[in-house]
Structure formats: structure tokens, C-alpha cells
Amino acid sequence: MKLRNIVWVGMLFLSLLTYAQKPVYSFSDKGDIVTNSSYIKPFDTCTFKGVTPYIMKFENMLKTLSGQTYEIRCYKYNNWENDPGDFHVIEVRYNNNVVLTLENPEGWDFFSQDFVSSIMSYLCYGKVDLDENTIVLLFTGTNIMSQPPYCTLIVLKEGKASLIYNQQAFINDIQKNNILTRIVLQRNTVEWLNENTQSNKPEYDSLILKSGMVYSAK
Amino acid sequence: MNPYNYRPVRVDRYKNGVQIGGVFLAGDVKDAVSKVAYVQELLGDVQITQHQLVAPMSFDENQEDNDFGGGGDSWNWDESDLTQTGDGEWTYHGHDAYGNEQDYTVIDTDGDGKPDSIFIDPNPPVDPDPGTEEPDPDWGWGDGEDGNGGDEWETTDPDDSSDGSKDPVDPNPGGGSSSGGETTEPNKPSNKKTVNEIQTAAQAAVNNVVDKYGMENGTFAPHCNAGVSEAFRLLYNDNALSNMNANSMITYWTSHPEAWEEVSMQDAQILANQGYFVVAGWINPTGGSGHVVVIVPGEPVNSTSWDGKVPLTMDTGSNKRYVGKPISQSFSSKKKDNIKYFKYK
């Protein structure tokens, strides 16, 4: 009787776990990444005068575990000293060809060094090896207006780069074990009326990176 | 300027060779206090430590006859208000800019036996409750305790300014604007502070927010409402803005026009430089967290994203704990048309 109960509870737990974790993207028949627009909030498309030529803030080469090499460049707008963001353009190159360019006028901030123990950190982003051929890049948007900054994920796979996730969320923690990397997100701003009283509750979310896939989990 | 040589007093401020403000101190006694306050704003980084100021009583430095009651005089006085207290010295009984009765010392500078110049207090107090306190019989006359003998102007190196203000000039010294100019009614006490007081309170508010809330997950969590309410409390000893989130605070400012006047972004910086407590806020239409900041005194800077000059803020929002950065780093440019600015009257 006891054993049957344990099995039932275990099955229930597994089903909940399966239900709660949703893949953020899928694959086409050819094996290409197919993004899900519900996870990608578009960037604003503002045009500003005098922001070119962009200023290079960071550039480096990344290799997958199988040896494919990508070049990552991050640029800041010109004449942007009094405006938000450490950098505003992300460019991914493969074999000297630009395979992805993202532009965000609100900008991204340099990547926090508070998570170096659980994620490979560079000046502008964090990196996770998702499998032998796949890399995930994590960028954090600018903090402005007391709103959660954007959490931006790019997947590099088979010479291509795809924006798979762009949502507003504070990164509260990044945890890593032998199987997965878990990014703990807080989707809203908690306001305090005073030192002891919150006016609302935090809404948590997380991203789980494992086995060649990124999952969204409540 | 030395009160013993009785030179006419005029203060002008130039920027890149262009006059951007100026005032002739002489004129009606009732205007004297506000004129001196304006002179202090014009001087900006120049710190005034003299306790005594003398001004010839005419509207124009080219006016030949400046005597009280002389031909061509265009200022108001009543002979009964003038009491001779010594050789070439009188007491003028009038009112200050706030309507308080005040005695001023009047002197004869050109030796014709008639009064033509008046001593006025260069540091006019802002009395929140005029009439309830006895006027200081010394009204700021220098006693030498400051080492300056009370009769010399002292300037400091602009780079050594303690108030941090840069070129706080009222482009509309005569008022006339309902929001950008001097809007204080003569008999009504305003909540104006000095530039230094606002800067100090803003920095102290930031420090207090850091002390109270610390860091969370390696960053400063959003506490913009705490910063604004703390700055207000430090300046006015008033907890009216406490225990409100950002959206509620902006709603409160909007619904209390007797105390909070909505102003334009351009006027926000001018008013902050004049010593008003000025705030800005964005209500989040989704009901989520909004954002509030204090506009702090200083020189507006150019923002590419906002396409023009923008005021400076104190911001204790998400990962912000600073005083004196442009508002374009506090609010997204796409929200700039939805930001409201208020002056504490």
C-alpha cells in the first residue's frame, strides 16, 4: 500500500514537472530552430540622429564544444553619454558573415559578475554550453523606470544565431548543477511602502537550460 | 561691493559673451528682498558671505537724481516713514517682500543731505509664518564673527562650490509665466529652499535608502518612492509622501493642486535651480510599478534619445542610487510624453 502511494505521488510530481516546463523553441524538420513569438517581446524601433558610427564596446570569439567558432560584437550608440544602456547593438558573426543583429535603443547593461560561480561571464553576457553544438548567450537589459529589465537569450547552433527569448524580468539567481542551469526570474517589480510593508508580491518564473533545449518553468 | 563707498549695484551674468540675466538692485523697497534673492541666483557658484548690502534707490543707473523725494524719482515712499537717526542716516519703515513690517537703514551717499541709498539684507529669510516672529533687530548686519567684518563680499573658487549648482539662472526674472517664472505671491510663504539644501537632502535621501534597504541579489532593488519621500521628509519634516507607492504618489500630487503645481519639463529644471522641490513621475497604466524621481538643481544636459536638453534627477529606482544624472537615464524616451512634473508650491 505504501509503495503504491509513493509511486502515485512520484507520477503526479513528474506529470506536474512535465506540464510546468515548456520548451521555449522547437526544431524544424531540417533541424533549424523555430522560435516562439510568445517568448519574444519585440524591441522598439526608434530612429535617432547621430548615433552612428557605433562604438565597439566588446568583441570576442566563442567556440562550441564541437569546435564551431562564433564572433560576438557589442556596440554602443554614438552620442549616447546621457542616455541609457552600456551597449545597444549585438552582432553575431559566423565565418565572417553576420548571422544576427539585434538593436535595442534602451540598451543592455554589462553583465553582472555576481553569477560567475554558475555561469561563464564576459563583459556583456553570460554563456552556457547547451550541448556539443549549441551555446546560449544571456544578456540583461538596462534598468530604467523601476521596471524589470529585459532578459535576452540568443542560441547559437550550426552556424546560425536565433533570438529565442526576450522578456522583462529581474534575474534573481543562476543555479548550476551537472545536469542543468536554472535562471531564476522575477517578472514584476515589488514595491515597498516602508521597510516592513510590501505593496505587492513577487511573481517568479524560471528558465531551465538542459539537454540542448531551454524550458520555461513556473 | 563695499557699503562704505556706496557704489551703485548692478549684477549681470554673461555666458559666452551673451548676457543671460541681470538686475539693477535699486528700486522699491518692497522689491529689494526678491531682487537680492535673484542676484544670489545670478551669482551661482559665487558664495555670498557679506551680511550687508547697499543699493541706490533708483530704477536706472543713469538717473541723475536718486534722492528720496527728489525730482524724477519714481519709487514710492512716505516722508512719515523716514526717521533721521544720525548725520546722513535715516531709518525707513516699510515692508519686506513677504509683507512683514521692516526697518531699513537709509543713507546719503552723494553728500547732498538727502537719503539716496538703502541697506538691505542680502540673505532674506523665508518665513513660513510671517508675523509670528519678531524681526531680527540686527537683520543680518555683519558683526565680524565670520571674519569678514560684515562689510566685504567674499567670493570662492567656482570649482570649490559647496552647493554644486551650475549657472542657476532664471531666464524670466520678472516672472510673467504661470509656471516657469517666480510664482510666489508676495504675502504667501513658499516652500523654496536653497540649492544647497535640496542637493544635501537629495544625497542624504539616497544614502538613507541605501542604508535602509541595502542590496538584493547583488543589485539595488527599486525603491524610487522611498527616495522621493525621504528627500521630502528631510527638507520639510513632513511624512505626507510616506507609505505610498510610485503610482499613488503621482496621483496624490495630481489631486493636491493646493500644494503641488504641475509644470513643464523645461520649467522643472529652472524651478529646481530656484530652490523649489520639484518631482517627476510616470504612472504605469498597467497598474504595475510606476516611477518617481526628484529634479535636482544643476545645468540641463543634452540627451540624444530625448532629442534635447533634459533636467537632472535624484533616482533610487532599480539599480539607481544617484543624484545629478539626466532624466533620460531615469525614464525611457518612449515614455517621455507621459511623465508629469510637479513643483511643491
Image: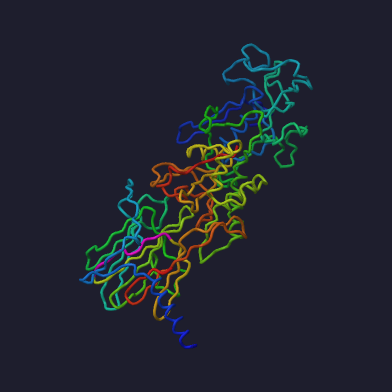
The number of numbered discs placed on residues in the rendered structure image is: 0
Q: Looking at the image, which residue is at 55% across and 28% down?
A: B175
Q: Is residue B342 left or right of residue A54?
A: right
| Residue B328 falls left or right of residue A98 | right
- Write down the region rendered in magenta: A159-168
Q: Is residue B275 visible?
A: no
Q: Position of residue B120 (x, y in %)?
A: 68, 29
Can see residue B128?
yes
B148 relative to A36, above or below:
above
Residue A139 image offset from top left, x and y in percent: 38, 64
Q: Quadrant of residue A125?
A: bottom left
Q: Position of residue B181 (x, y in %)?
A: 54, 31
User: Is residue A76 left or right of B72 when viewed as pictured?
Assistant: left
| B199 or B112: nearer the viewer | B199
Whether B195 is drawn above or below A170: the answer is above
Q: Main secondary structure of the magenta part?
A: strand
Q: Quadrant of the C terminus of chain A?
A: bottom left
Q: Farthest residue toward the top?
A: B71
Figure coloring = rainbow
